[in-house]
Image: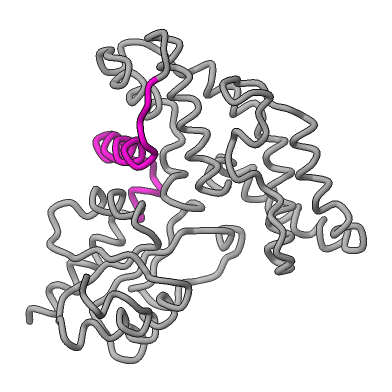
Amino acid sequence: MNDFTRTASGQSAYWFFNPKVILYVEGKTDINFYEGMIHGIECKIEKLNGELAGPKIEQQILRNGSPYLICYDGDYTLFTAARSKHRQIIRLSRYSFENYFWRWDLLNEVACKLSGVQRNSKDLVSSGFASMENKKSCFDDLLIMDVFVRNQSIGVVAFPPNIHAILKRSDSMSFCDTKILKYKESVKQLTSNQKKHLREISKSCNTYLTARSSFHFYRGHFVFSAVRHVIMNAVKKHIGNNLTIPDMALSQMMGDVLWANELDEDLRKIKLKVRRQLNLLIKKLSA
């Protein structure tokens, strides 16, 4: 590993000794997603090392015009109209890259691949996909509470870490209302004295949730766990036994299928923005 990539300060100073265009992303699991996005562009992709790395690299961009491009998750900033600090600092249009995977056609294509079935020749995932979609109103309630505690910097997470945390059984498509209630109760007492603030957040969030799919806004790991659960249950039902595949491998497969298909409009715009900025930086650096 290059010594400059070990620390946030080292990452931000990297360009002075290695004049290359670098795309910075939030984690190693993001790299495959962005490789598909910038396919054909000669560019180094690095993950940000620690919470301080992003701000330090931002300063290099703002002060020195360094040839860096940072792509952050959309996170809960999606519920605000905040503008980017700079054209070389971009946020995804969904909570994280995993949220772009939540499409019936993508899930079904991957399920078919894993089941040894011709591409989309059968509908394997509709039942599981519908089970998740039908629970959105409940998920939305948890999301609003999660946005509330995040805004208050309380340090409590109101949203389940993954889909299995609220299922009746790990292999089922049925949800446990008792488990879901525990997440609501975990922050209920925290909101009892701030009901007005909670109503304001709820109103703001619902404006976005009614205009777009709720799965755009849920935590990325939660969405990926739903993607995995729907696919693996469909595969098991079709082939008759469990199939083992690591999360990283499934994520890479989902990414490959995503970029091979027609893109949603918001992802198409992000892709164009990222590729345009990288090409401008490469042109500028080579001038």
Residue 149 spot, x, y in % from top left: 73, 61
Name the quarter where the N terminus is drawn.
bottom left
In the displayed structure, would residue 65 be above or below residue 170? below
Taking the image as shown, residue 8 lies to the left or right of residue 16, namely right
Observer-nearest residue: 270 or 109? 109
- Residue positioned 69% across, 26% down in the render: 175
* 188 left or right, relative to 148: right
Instruction: Name above or below for residue 187 compared with residue 81.
Output: above
Name which residue lies at 30% across and 11% down. Answer: 121
Magenta stretch: residue 45 in it?
no
Magenta span: 243-270
> Residue at position x 44%, y 80% from top?
55
Would you say 143 lies left or right of 115 here? right
Residue at 37% over, 26% down: 244
Residue 237 is situated, as x and y percent measured from the top left of the image, at 45, 11
Q: Position of residue 272 (x, y in %)?
A: 28, 56
